[in-house]
Image (cartoon, grey):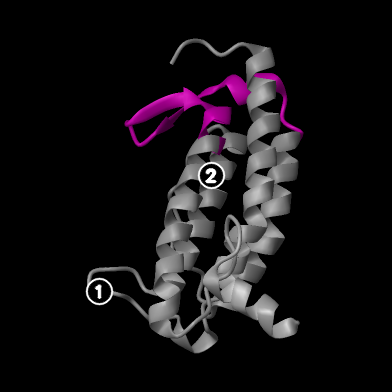
Amino acid sequence: MATLQPDQALFLRQWMLGALTREHPITRTVIEAVPRDKGDHRPDAVGKSAIDLAWHIVGAEHRFMEAVANGVFDFTNSGRPPELQTSADVARWYADTFPRDAERIGAMPVEALMKVVDFRGIFQLPAVAYLQTAQMHSIHHRGQLSMYLRPMGAKVPAIYGESYDSAQAKKDRV
């Protein structure tokens, strides 16, 4: 990647924090749609369970944001904390953690945003670039989790516009 200029790093931070902030409630809604008693649902024996996929989404997003803030990736303690047993627990953790991560990144000096950070020897990018990776990763796995919902008997929430289920709920209110 070409050298990032300070004004570019500041623009990327502003743009990506805005994008992540807009996606945050959508991701939370998909996680909250997983029924509390269906967290162990998995569409295939080799796939993640719904609760583990929900954790993967929010845990990885947090890890990417921490790497931006800290200037280094930390892969220790990446498993789901034992107290997060349901989708509601994961959604609550995400609701509490995301604003702190965003605030911390919003206060970073430009030099820290421009610092090159290594991701497992695969990518060496300016720290701020990992905000886009966080967003793409979350959206990708959120889509995956949304495909778990109907087979487990849950309603699919609106993501980008109405879903069948959100449209039906709207009709039922009229």
Q: Disc 2 designates what residue?
A: 135
- CB contact under 8 Å: marks 2 and 1: no
Which residue lies at the image location 68% right of the left edge and 48% below the top edge? 22
What is the spatial separation of the Cα atoms under label 2 and label 1, in whole angstroms? 26 Å
Q: Amino acid at mark 2?
A: Gln
Which residue does the image show at 56% across and 51% down from the upper left? Answer: 62
> What is the x, y in percent for residue 171?
67, 79
Q: Is residue 167 above or below residue 11?
A: below
In this rendering, the answer to whether 39 lies above or below 110 is below
Which residue is more in the foreground, 75 or 65? 65
The residues colored magenta run: 107-131
Residue under pointer 1: 44
Left or right of 68 on screen, residue 38: left
Residue 30: image quadrant is: bottom right
From the viewer's side, name the closer residue of 27 and 172.
Answer: 172
Q: Identify which amino acid the numbered label 1 is placed on.
A: Asp
Which secondary structure lies at badge 2?
helix
| x, y percent for residue 131 | 56, 37
Q: Earlier in the sequence, mark 2 or mark 1?
A: 1
Residue 48 spot, x, y in % from top left: 34, 69
| Residue 130 located within the stretch drawn in magenta | yes
23 up-or-down from 144: above or below: above
Q: Residue at x 63, y 45 (%)?
A: 20
Q: Residue at x 60, y 64 (%)?
A: 162
Label 1: state its secondary structure: loop
| Quadrant housing residue 105 | top right
**Image quadrant where one finds the C terminus:** bottom right
Quadrant of res 17: top right
| Residue 137, horizontal then vertical, whole percent | 45, 47
Mark 1: give few (<14), some (14-19) or many (20+) Cα within 10 Å. Answer: few
